[in-house]
Image (spheres, rainbow, N blue to C red):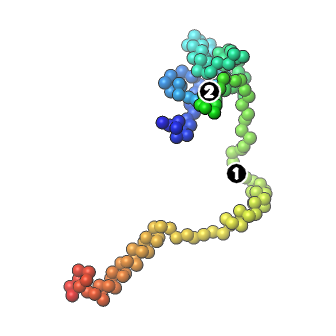
Amino acid sequence: LIRSKGVGVYYVTQSPSDVPDRVSAQLGNRIQHALRAFTPREQKAIRAAAETFRPNPSIDTERAIQELRVGEALVSLLRGKGEPSMVERTLIRPPMSRVGPLTADERKKFIEADRDNVKKYAKGLDRESAHERLQDRSTMLGQLKHSAKKVFPGLFGGKG
């Protein structure tokens, strides 16, 4: 159900055995970074992780998982018709963005480069909200009702 709604969930863990099999079976896009195995249990976890990928005849997935270096990963993505691609060894490019605000000079450059939108959005608007309109209407109806009682005293339940 969630997949049909376009919702993506990423599981990030140090050990693939942390993700239950019934959840792991539903994952479409897989990105596996290096795992090191020093105990039989860890070796079993690597074997299990390798088996979750669609095999590629040119890659020993289990061995590759242990040989990956910093910035490398094994990747399998869903293709056009929903089938997983064969596992591939790839480099993961670091983000090209930064965290933090623009400097004053950078902000000025963006503003100068986009004059049309700056003019369009520079002027502030004080739009009347729906709450304000309903409040005004309620006040106006109350005043009309009060005025009508004076003109037609018996019409609105008053004594006449």
| Residue 12 visible within the image | no
Say which residue label 1 marks.
Answer: 101
Please name the residue shown 23% across and 83% down the image: 158
Q: Amino acid at mark 1?
A: Pro
Secondary structure beneath dot 2 equals loop
Quadrant hosting residue 68: top right
Please name the residue shown 58% across and 27% down the image: 13
Secondary structure beneath dot 1 equals loop
Residue 29 image point, x, y percent: 61, 30
Furthest residue in direction front, as rendered = 81
Please name the residue shown 43% across and 70% down the image: 134
Q: Residues within 10 Å of mark 1 (few under 14, many from 20)?
A: few
Q: Residues within 10 Å of mark 2 (few under 14, many from 20)?
A: some
| Residue 89 visible within the image | yes
Classify residue 54 as left or right of residue 148: right
Say which residue label 2 marks.
Answer: 84
Task: Relative to 153, say whether 46 is above or below.
Answer: above
Please name the residue shown 63% across and 69% down the image: 124
Residue 115 image point, x, y percent: 76, 63
Task: Relative to 81, say whether 61 is above or below.
Answer: above
Q: Amino acid at mark 2?
A: Pro
Classify residue 70 as left or right of residue 23: right
Q: How many marks?
A: 2
Residue 113 image point, x, y percent: 78, 59
Residue 36 image point, x, y percent: 64, 18
